[in-house]
C-alpha cells in the first residue's frame, strides 16, 4: 500500500526519473516496493525475461527483486547508504543500480529510492519543447532530438531521405540557435534538456 508520504514526494520524484530515462523504485524500510515508474517496470522485465523469468515488479518484488538484481553484480552493496553498482546483462551493457536512503514526510525512518540507469538507452528530448525553447524549425528540432538519441548525420540523412549537406546546413542552424559550436557540446546540452516534457 502506498502511504501519503510516498504519494506526496515519491511519485513526483519517480516521474522526474522517468523523464530522464531512469527507472525508479521506492522501497519501504522493510524492503517492499511501494512504487515504481514505468521505466523501472520495463528495465526489470527486460533484465529478468532474458533469464526466462517473468515477474510483476510490484506483486512479486521487494527484497527478493533487489537480491536478484544484486546477484547479477560483481560487487556487493548495502541499502543503508548511498551505493552504486553495475548489474550485468547478457549481450547488453550493464544497468547501473543506485540506492539512496531518503526520508519522506511523516516517516521516522528513511525509505530507499532505487535508481536504474540503462546504458543502452539515451533519453531523447522532446522536439516540440526544443522548437519553443530555441526557436528551431520542426526539421531542426527533429534533427537535434535524433542526434541526442545517438544517430549520426549520415543516418539522419537516410532516415529523412535528404542529402548529408541538407542535414549539415540544418545542424549549423541548430548550433547558432542553441549557442553551441560542436556536436558534442550540443549533445551535452540536449542531454540536460531530455527530462523536459
Image (spheres, rainbow, N blue to C red):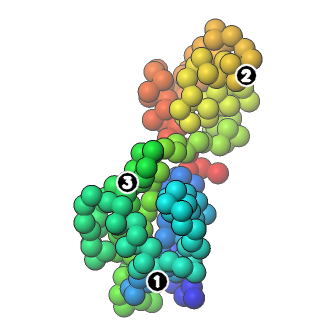
Above/below status of 36 relative to 59: above
Q: In the drawing, does residue 170 fall left or right of residue 68?
A: right
User: Could you tell me residue 157's position as x and y percent?
Assistant: 66, 18
- Residue at the (52%, 42%) spot, across then down: 122
Q: For the residues marked 3 and 1, what is the alpha-carbon distance in whole angstroms?
A: 23 Å
How far apart are the two marked residues, 2 and 1, measured between alpha carbons? 47 Å
**Which quadrant of the structure image shows residue 88?**
bottom left
From this viewpoint, is residue 8 visible?
A: no
Q: Position of residue 119 (x, y in %)?
A: 44, 46
Among the 4 quarters of the image, the one containing residue 49: bottom right
Of residues 44 and 37, which is closer to you in this image?
Answer: 44
Q: Is residue 18 above or below residue 166?
A: below
| Sequence order check, earlier mark of 3 and 1 | 1
Q: Which residue carries the number 1 mark?
A: 32
What mark, if any, has residue 160 been given in the picture? 2
Q: Is residue 97 left or right of residue 137?
A: left
Q: Residue at x 42, y 45 (%)?
A: 93
| Real-space Cα separation, disc 3 to disc 2, in angstroms | 36 Å
Q: Earlier in the sequence, mark 2 or mark 1?
A: 1
User: Which secondary structure lies at badge 2?
Assistant: helix
Say the numbered circle drawn on residue 50. Answer: none
Q: Nearer the viewer, mark 3 or mark 2?
A: 3
Depth check: give the residue in front, 75 or 159.
75
Q: Describe the element under mark 1 as helix, strand or loop.
A: loop
Residue for badge 3: 88
The image shows residue 21 at horizontal and vertical percentages of: 53, 52
| Residue pictured at 67% horizontal, 31% vertical | 141
Pointer 1 local density, CA inside 10 Å: few below 14, some 14–19, many at least 20: many
Residue 139, picture quadrant: top right
Amino acid at each position: 500500500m502506498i502511504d501519503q508520504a510516498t504519494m506526496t514526494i515519491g511519485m513526483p520524484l519517480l516521474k522526474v526519473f522517468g523523464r530522464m530515462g531512469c527507472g525508479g523504485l521506492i522501497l519501504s524500510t522493510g524492503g517492499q516496493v511501494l512504487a515504481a515508474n514505468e521505466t523501472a517496470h520495463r528495465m526489470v522485465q527486460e533484465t529478468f525475461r532474458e533469464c526466462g523469468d517473468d515477474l510483476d515488479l510490484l506483486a512479486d518484488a521487494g527484497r527478493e527483486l533487489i537480491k536478484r538484481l544484486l546477484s547479477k553484480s560483481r560487487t556487493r552493496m548495502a541499502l543503508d547508504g548511498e551505493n552504486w553498482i553495475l548489474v550485468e546483462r547478457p549481450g547488453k551493457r550493464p544497468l547501473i543500480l543506485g540506492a539512496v536512503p531518503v526520508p519522506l514526510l511523516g516517516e521516522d525512518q528513511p525509505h530507499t529510492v532505487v535508481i536504474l540507469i540503462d546504458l543502452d538507452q539515451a533519453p531523447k528530448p522532446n522536439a516540440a519543447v526544443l522548437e519553443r525553447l530555441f526557436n528551431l524549425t520542426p526539421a531542426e528540432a527533429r534533427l537535434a532530438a535524433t542526434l541526442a538519441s545517438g544517430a549520426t548525420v549520415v543516418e539522419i540523412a537516410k532516415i529523412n531521405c535528404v542529402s548529408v549537406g541538407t542535414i549539415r546546413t540544418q545542424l549549423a542552424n541548430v548550433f547558432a540557435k542553441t549557442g553551441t559550436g560542436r556536436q558534442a557540446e550540443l549533445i551535452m546540452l540536449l542531454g540536460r534538456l531530455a527530462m523536459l516534457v
